[in-house]
Image (cartoon, rainbow, N blue to C red):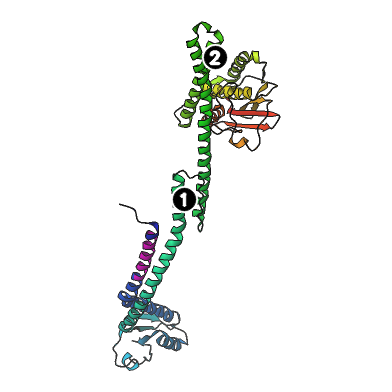
């Protein structure tokens, strides 16, 4: 069963609310009118008793009693020592109509010590004619209010539901893959906020879709090259087995290893982003771990004339997953190797900043444009659309760095200037 439309629901709620108000008005003005009238007359009688009690010794008491009779239809008769002329009986005042009264007798003490008893009579005028008049007025008012309520309910329902319906239609377009869709919800602060949020989501989804397409293109490029090399050399070895050389075998092994590394990086990043990876946190010597990785990288690149230096003041211990933090440092180091430029100078710095230790990896390459800096940590992002194979690594290193540091509740960042190189860094809490 389909849910009713929002506009219909709002209309029904508003109309129901107006109907409830009218029903309450009818009940109060007809069914309970007589009882309410008697309640009010009884309260006025008690107020008159309080006034008389306060002014019982006043020389103007006669005027006060007369005023109560004239203004409030409350007549007061004396039953003992105090003589008070009564107003004419209701029949003479209101014709032959017999009126009901609420009667109460109260005793008062004068200054001379004498007591006087006064009987208070609150006239009850029949309200049948009033009820009939009110009923006629309510019939007219009800018809007018119902008509106005229907028109107002329709107007409000349309005004509230129209921007939501527009957002819903735009959301359907977005769900079909139209990431250029924009949401234009206005009229209410909450709807404007929702519209802005959905616009931001549409922009992000469009960017992610662009990154996905770029990923497919880049991964396809990275896969196609080694596969073509492996196949061509394997075909040559098959056709000319006597001409097999060690260099050809080594090239096949290197390209196969590159493929394996690329696949592993993709799988690792997928696990990190799906929270399947858990950190094996323990206390270890961060400085020693960085020193070992740096030395291994020097050995790996000693024929390429890279100059890699590691600067630190003392040994630092942290609570972290040693393997994952080692992966972070290795990825930043590989990134520096790939983009260090012709100078091939890489500087690694370990420094303490309050309760954190910062590891910085600096290169002297071409640097990164300021407009590209906010997005370089995103998955598969590349500042240049012209994709090229890295010297080593897979191009997914910075994404893996970001996820691992986030898992450790650490901080990361980059500073760069075009033509002067880049410095990537991350920070971890220091173990006391």
Task: Examine the image and state in which quarter residue 390 appears.
Answer: top right
Residue 17 forms part of the magenta stretch: yes
Q: Is residue 280 shown to the viewer in this render?
A: no
Residues at marks 2 and 1, CA–CA distance in whole angstroms: 53 Å
Pinpoint residue 28: horizontal percent, then vertical percent.
Answer: 34, 73
Circle 2 sits in a helix, a strand or a loop, which is it?
A: helix
- Of the pair 153 and 181, the residue shown nearer to us: 181
Residue beneath the point at 47% across and 85% down: 58
Pinpoint residue 408: horizontal percent, then vertical percent.
Answer: 53, 29
Residue beneath the point at 42% across and 79% down: 53
29 sits to left or right of 296: left
Task: Examine the image and state in which quarter residue 353 appears.
Answer: top right
Residue beneath the point at 37% across and 79% down: 45
Q: Main secondary structure of the magenta part?
A: helix
Pinpoint residue 198: horizontal percent, then vertical percent.
Answer: 50, 47
* Residue bearing mark 2: 251
59 sits to left or right of 9: right
- Of the pair 163 and 427, the residue shown nearer to us: 163
- Of the pair 386 and 155, the residue shown nearer to us: 386
């Amino acid at each position: 069963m389909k849910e009713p439309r929002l506009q219909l629901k709002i209309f029904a709620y508003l109309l129901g609310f107006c109907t409830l108000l009218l029903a309450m008005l009818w009940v109060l003005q007809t069914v309970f009118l007589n009882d309410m009238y008697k309640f009010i007359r009884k309260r006025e009688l008690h107020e008159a008793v309080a006034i008389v009690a306060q002014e019982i010794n006043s020389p103007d008491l006669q005027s006060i009693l007369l005023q109560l009779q004239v203004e409030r239809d409350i007549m007061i008769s004396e039953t003992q020592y105090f003589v008070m002329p009564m107003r004419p009986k209701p029949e003479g005042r209101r014709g032959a109509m017999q009126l009901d009264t609420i009667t109460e007798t109260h005793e008062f003490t004068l200054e001379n010590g004498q007591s006087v008893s006064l009987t208070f009579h609150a006239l009850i005028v029949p309200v049948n004619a009033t009820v009939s008049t009110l009923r006629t007025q309510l019939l007219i008012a009800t018809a007018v209010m119902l008509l106005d309520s229907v028109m107002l309910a329709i107007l409000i329902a349309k005004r509230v539901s129209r921007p939501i319906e527009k957002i819903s239609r735009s959301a359907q377009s977005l769900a079909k893959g139209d990431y250029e869709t924009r949401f234009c919800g206005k009229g209410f602060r909450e709807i404007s906020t929702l519209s802005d949020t959905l616009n931001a989501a549409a922009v992000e989804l469009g960017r992610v879709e662009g990154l996905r397409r770029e990923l497919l293109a880049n991964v396809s490029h990275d896969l196609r090259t080694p596969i073509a090399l492996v196949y061509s050399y394997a075909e040559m070895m098959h056709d000319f087995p006597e001409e097999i050389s060690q260099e050809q075998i080594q090239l096949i092994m290197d390209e196969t290893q590159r493929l394996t590394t690329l696949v592993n990086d993709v799988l690792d990043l997928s696990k990190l982003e799906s929270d399947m990876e858990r950190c094996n946190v323990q206390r270890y010597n961060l400085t020693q771990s960085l020193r070992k990785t740096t030395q291994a990288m020097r050995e790996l690149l000693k024929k390429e004339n890279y100059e890699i230096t590691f600067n630190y003041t003392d040994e630092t211990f942290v609570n972290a997953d040693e393997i994952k933090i080692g992966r972070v440092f290795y990825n930043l180091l590989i990134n520096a190797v790939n983009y260090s430029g012709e100078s091939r100078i890489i500087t690694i710095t370990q420094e303490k900043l309050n309760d954190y230790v910062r590891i910085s990896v600096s290169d002297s390459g071409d640097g990164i444009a300021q407009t590209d800096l906010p997005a370089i940590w995103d998955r598969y992002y590349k500042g240049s659309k012209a994709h090229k194979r890295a010297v080593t690594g897979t191009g997914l290193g910075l994404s893996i760095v970001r996820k691992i540091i986030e898992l450790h509740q650490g901080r990361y960042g980059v500073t760069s200037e075009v033509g002067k190189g880049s410095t990537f860094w991350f920070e971890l809490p220091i173990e006391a």
